[in-house]
Amino acid sequence: MNIHAQWIVGFTDGEGCFYVGISPSKSMTLGFRVIPTFSVTQHKKDIKVLYGLKTYFGCGTVYEGKGNDCVCKYRVADQKNLFMKIVPFFEKHPLKTSKHLNFLKFREIIQIMARGEHLKPEGLDRIQRIKSLMNIKYVDIE
Amino acid sequence: MNIHAQWIVGFTDGEGCFYVGISPSKSMTLGFRVIPTFSVTQHKKDIKVLYGLKTYFGCGTVYEGKGNDCVCKYRVADQKNLFMKIVPFFEKHPLKTSKHLNFLKFREIIQIMARGEHLKPEGLDRIQRIKSLMNIKYVDIE
């Protein structure tokens, strides 16, 4: 599948999600693991476009749901791939909807993690503050 | 807003809809009016991209819902604009999801209407048959 960068931007404006999970984890010194993910969901009948995204970015996983009537997901959760591939892509090709504002917060968290600051209390606090501002329903984009 | 054709394709693959309504109408000889529409819906916070589409295509209307938490819609229902602008655009820039198959049926109906055949019983029957195959949930795209 021949995919144009702008098609990915348009499709992500429609179907994509930048999300940061913070989960309790006994193996982490601070007791929490920060898990940023970029994902695109689609009905199973169009799973081929999710594999198209995987090929384009050269990373991530396509999760195939079971049964005919289910949602499938392309997901990138690997920190290095997010930092090296996903973030630079959407910096070069900005989203046109208010999802762009979410992306900017997502990028900030990825950059904090790239510097290893999420392993220190101040860094984790900062991530939690940024996360609290993400995916808010009413966004003033003026 | 500077919009690339491929962004529109990607966004339509995500959020667009090709629909053909057939409604009873006393003013039509056959008693039915065929109303094809191309529409893209979006939350009000991103209404600017709908106006971007309107500017790009040079036709259609943006319907603004009331209140902050509502869905807005860009809609093209004018037969001439569908025939002269929307159909040629998606012929030149094909959709990548199974929505493309819907578009092909939509185009067939638009072409039937452009020839005035929807005003004859055979044409209306044909449109009803094509419409019955549109927007089916499970589409085999192999």
Image (tube, coloured by chain):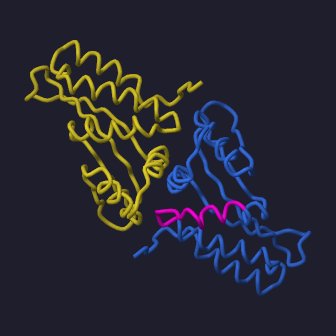
Chain colours: A blue, B yellow
Q: Which SS does the magenta portion mostly show?
A: helix
Instruction: Judge from the rendering whether residue A21 lies leftward or rightward of residue A132; answer left or right.
Output: right
- Give the image location of residue A117, x and y in percent: 80, 81
**Residue name at image x 53 percent, y 64 percent:** A94
Instruction: Judge from the rendering whether residue A92 lies leftward or rightward of residue A32; answer left or right.
Output: left
In this picture, is A86 found above or below A8?
Answer: below
- Give the image location of residue A3, x and y in percent: 58, 44
Instruction: Judge from the rendering whether residue B113 lies leftward or rightward of residue B74; answer left or right.
Output: left
Looking at the picture, tell me which residue is in the foreground, B140 or A11.
A11
In this picture, is B53 found above or below B20?
Answer: below
Looking at the picture, tell me which residue is in the foreground, B84 or B21.
B84
Q: Point out the image quarter for the C terminus of chain A.
A: bottom left
Q: Point out the image quarter for the N terminus of chain A.
A: top right
- Give the image location of residue A13, x and y in percent: 51, 57
Kindly indicate the quadrant of the structure image that contains residue A115: bottom right
Kindly indicate the quadrant of the structure image that contains residue A121: bottom right
Looking at the picture, tell me which residue is in the foreground, B73 or A86.
A86
**Residues shaded magenta:** A85-99
Instruction: Judge from the rendering whether residue A53 lies leftward or rightward of residue A139; answer left or right.
Output: right
- Give the image location of residue B4, x and y in percent: 44, 54
In this picture, is B45 found above or below A118?
Answer: above
**Residue name at image x 52 percent, y 53 percent:** A6
Instruction: Inspect the magenta stretch and tell me whether residue B141 lies in it.
Output: no
**Residue name at image x 36 percent, y 62 percent:** B47
Q: Residue furthest bottom?
A: A122
